[in-house]
Amino acid sequence: MKLLLFVILYISISVSSYCQAIQFKSKINQDHFIFTSADTIEIKVLKFYIANLQFWRNGKLVQTDKKRAYLIDVLKDETTTIPYKKSADSLSFILGVDSLIQRKGAMGAGLDPSNGMYWTWQSGYIHFKLEAITNGARNLQLHIGGYSAPHNTIQ
Protein backbone atom coordinates (compact mmCIF):
# COMPACT_ATOMS: atom_id res chain seq x y z
CA MET A 1 0.00 0.00 0.00
CA LYS A 2 2.90 2.36 0.73
CA LEU A 3 4.18 1.76 -2.80
CA LEU A 4 0.79 2.64 -4.26
CA LEU A 5 0.70 5.92 -2.35
CA PHE A 6 4.30 6.56 -3.33
CA VAL A 7 3.52 6.16 -7.04
CA ILE A 8 0.20 8.02 -6.97
CA LEU A 9 1.58 10.99 -5.06
CA TYR A 10 4.23 11.57 -7.66
CA ILE A 11 2.13 11.29 -10.78
CA SER A 12 1.76 14.94 -11.68
CA ILE A 13 -0.20 16.88 -14.22
CA SER A 14 0.53 20.26 -15.67
CA VAL A 15 -2.01 22.88 -16.72
CA SER A 16 -0.91 26.26 -18.09
CA SER A 17 -3.17 29.30 -18.06
CA TYR A 18 -3.92 28.75 -21.75
CA CYS A 19 -3.73 25.03 -21.85
CA GLN A 20 -2.74 23.27 -25.06
CA ALA A 21 -2.68 19.87 -23.41
CA ILE A 22 -2.85 18.09 -20.10
CA GLN A 23 0.21 15.93 -19.66
CA PHE A 24 0.60 13.17 -17.08
CA LYS A 25 4.19 12.67 -15.95
CA SER A 26 5.41 10.02 -13.55
CA LYS A 27 7.70 11.29 -10.80
CA ILE A 28 9.32 9.87 -7.69
CA ASN A 29 10.88 12.20 -5.12
CA GLN A 30 10.44 15.21 -7.45
CA ASP A 31 12.43 13.50 -10.24
CA HIS A 32 11.08 11.95 -13.40
CA PHE A 33 10.89 8.21 -12.94
CA ILE A 34 12.82 6.24 -15.52
CA PHE A 35 11.56 2.73 -16.10
CA THR A 36 14.65 0.50 -16.20
CA SER A 37 15.59 -2.87 -14.78
CA ALA A 38 18.44 -1.23 -12.80
CA ASP A 39 15.93 0.43 -10.46
CA THR A 40 14.81 -0.99 -7.13
CA ILE A 41 11.43 -1.54 -8.71
CA GLU A 42 10.89 -2.27 -12.37
CA ILE A 43 7.46 -1.10 -13.48
CA LYS A 44 5.97 -3.44 -16.06
CA VAL A 45 2.45 -1.96 -16.16
CA LEU A 46 1.14 1.35 -14.80
CA LYS A 47 -2.28 2.25 -16.18
CA PHE A 48 -5.25 4.15 -14.82
CA TYR A 49 -8.47 5.78 -15.99
CA ILE A 50 -9.43 9.38 -15.50
CA ALA A 51 -13.02 10.44 -16.11
CA ASN A 52 -15.39 13.37 -15.58
CA LEU A 53 -12.66 15.81 -16.59
CA GLN A 54 -13.70 19.38 -15.74
CA PHE A 55 -11.86 22.60 -16.58
CA TRP A 56 -12.10 25.61 -14.26
CA ARG A 57 -11.19 29.30 -14.57
CA ASN A 58 -11.31 31.67 -11.59
CA GLY A 59 -13.29 29.12 -9.59
CA LYS A 60 -15.99 28.70 -12.25
CA LEU A 61 -16.62 25.63 -14.37
CA VAL A 62 -15.59 26.40 -17.97
CA GLN A 63 -16.25 23.04 -19.57
CA THR A 64 -16.83 19.37 -18.86
CA ASP A 65 -15.09 17.00 -21.24
CA LYS A 66 -17.65 14.93 -23.14
CA LYS A 67 -15.38 11.90 -23.50
CA ARG A 68 -16.38 9.30 -20.94
CA ALA A 69 -12.92 8.18 -19.80
CA TYR A 70 -9.26 8.36 -20.74
CA LEU A 71 -6.90 5.45 -20.31
CA ILE A 72 -3.48 6.69 -19.22
CA ASP A 73 -0.70 4.15 -19.77
CA VAL A 74 2.42 5.70 -18.27
CA LEU A 75 4.64 3.43 -20.37
CA LYS A 76 3.09 4.70 -23.63
CA ASP A 77 3.80 8.39 -24.21
CA GLU A 78 0.95 8.74 -26.72
CA THR A 79 -1.61 8.10 -23.94
CA THR A 80 -0.19 10.54 -21.37
CA THR A 81 -1.29 13.76 -23.10
CA ILE A 82 -4.86 15.00 -23.49
CA PRO A 83 -5.26 17.93 -25.91
CA TYR A 84 -7.32 20.88 -24.72
CA LYS A 85 -7.83 24.30 -26.29
CA LYS A 86 -9.62 26.41 -23.65
CA SER A 87 -8.31 28.82 -21.07
CA ALA A 88 -8.25 27.13 -17.65
CA ASP A 89 -6.34 27.57 -14.42
CA SER A 90 -7.33 24.29 -12.78
CA LEU A 91 -9.00 20.99 -13.48
CA SER A 92 -10.71 18.18 -11.66
CA PHE A 93 -11.31 14.55 -12.52
CA ILE A 94 -11.97 11.20 -10.90
CA LEU A 95 -9.46 8.39 -10.84
CA GLY A 96 -11.38 5.45 -12.28
CA VAL A 97 -14.61 5.15 -14.21
CA ASP A 98 -18.01 6.03 -12.79
CA SER A 99 -20.87 3.64 -12.12
CA LEU A 100 -22.70 4.60 -15.34
CA ILE A 101 -19.79 3.32 -17.42
CA GLN A 102 -19.42 0.26 -15.17
CA ARG A 103 -23.06 -0.73 -15.62
CA LYS A 104 -22.86 -0.48 -19.42
CA GLY A 105 -20.22 -3.19 -19.48
CA ALA A 106 -17.34 -3.52 -21.90
CA MET A 107 -17.06 -0.75 -24.50
CA GLY A 108 -14.60 0.34 -27.20
CA ALA A 109 -11.57 2.66 -27.53
CA GLY A 110 -9.83 3.22 -24.17
CA LEU A 111 -12.59 1.19 -22.52
CA ASP A 112 -12.00 -1.85 -24.74
CA PRO A 113 -11.29 -5.03 -22.72
CA SER A 114 -8.27 -5.70 -24.96
CA ASN A 115 -6.47 -2.91 -23.04
CA GLY A 116 -6.26 -5.24 -20.04
CA MET A 117 -8.30 -2.96 -17.79
CA TYR A 118 -11.56 -4.97 -17.60
CA TRP A 119 -12.35 -7.87 -15.30
CA THR A 120 -14.44 -10.27 -17.36
CA TRP A 121 -14.95 -12.54 -14.35
CA GLN A 122 -16.40 -9.62 -12.36
CA SER A 123 -17.80 -7.54 -15.26
CA GLY A 124 -16.14 -4.30 -14.27
CA TYR A 125 -13.29 -1.96 -15.02
CA ILE A 126 -9.96 -1.85 -13.22
CA HIS A 127 -9.46 1.78 -12.17
CA PHE A 128 -5.74 1.56 -11.43
CA LYS A 129 -3.27 -1.17 -12.37
CA LEU A 130 0.33 -1.47 -11.23
CA GLU A 131 2.47 -4.49 -12.01
CA ALA A 132 6.16 -4.53 -11.17
CA ILE A 133 9.16 -6.61 -10.25
CA THR A 134 10.95 -5.56 -7.09
CA ASN A 135 14.50 -6.38 -6.01
CA GLY A 136 14.88 -10.10 -5.53
CA ALA A 137 12.62 -10.77 -8.55
CA ARG A 138 9.45 -10.54 -6.47
CA ASN A 139 6.32 -9.89 -8.47
CA LEU A 140 3.98 -7.13 -7.39
CA GLN A 141 0.46 -6.84 -8.80
CA LEU A 142 -2.00 -4.21 -7.68
CA HIS A 143 -5.34 -4.04 -9.51
CA ILE A 144 -7.84 -1.64 -7.95
CA GLY A 145 -11.47 -1.40 -9.01
CA GLY A 146 -15.02 -1.54 -7.75
CA TYR A 147 -17.90 0.91 -7.97
CA SER A 148 -20.59 -0.15 -5.52
CA ALA A 149 -20.56 0.07 -1.73
CA PRO A 150 -18.65 -1.00 0.22
CA HIS A 151 -16.03 -1.44 -2.53
CA ASN A 152 -16.28 1.92 -4.32
CA THR A 153 -12.70 2.85 -5.19
CA ILE A 154 -13.32 5.95 -7.32
CA GLN A 155 -11.16 8.82 -6.04
Image (cartoon, grey):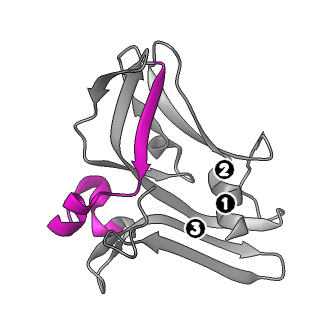
Q: Nearer the viewer, mark 2 or mark 3?
A: 2
Residue 130 numbered mark, or none: 3
Secondary element at tag 2: helix
Q: Which mark is residue 5?
A: 1
**Residue flagged by tag 3: what amino acid is it?**
Leu
Picture layout, residue 11 above or below residue 123: above
The boundaries of the magenta stretch are: 89-114
Looking at the image, tell me whether mark 2 or mark 3 is earlier in sequence order.
Answer: 2
Say which residue appears at 57% left-offset and 54% top-offset: 75
49 relative position to 108: left or right: right
Q: Which mark is residue 9?
A: 2
User: Would you call the spot at circle 1 few (<14 residues within 10 Å), some (14-19), or many (20 or more)?
Assistant: few
At x 42%, y 20%, the residue is 59
**Tag 2 near tag 1, CB within 8 Å:** yes
Query: At numbered mark 1, what does the secondary structure look like: helix, strand or loop?
Result: helix
What residue occupies the far bottom of the structure in this picture? 121
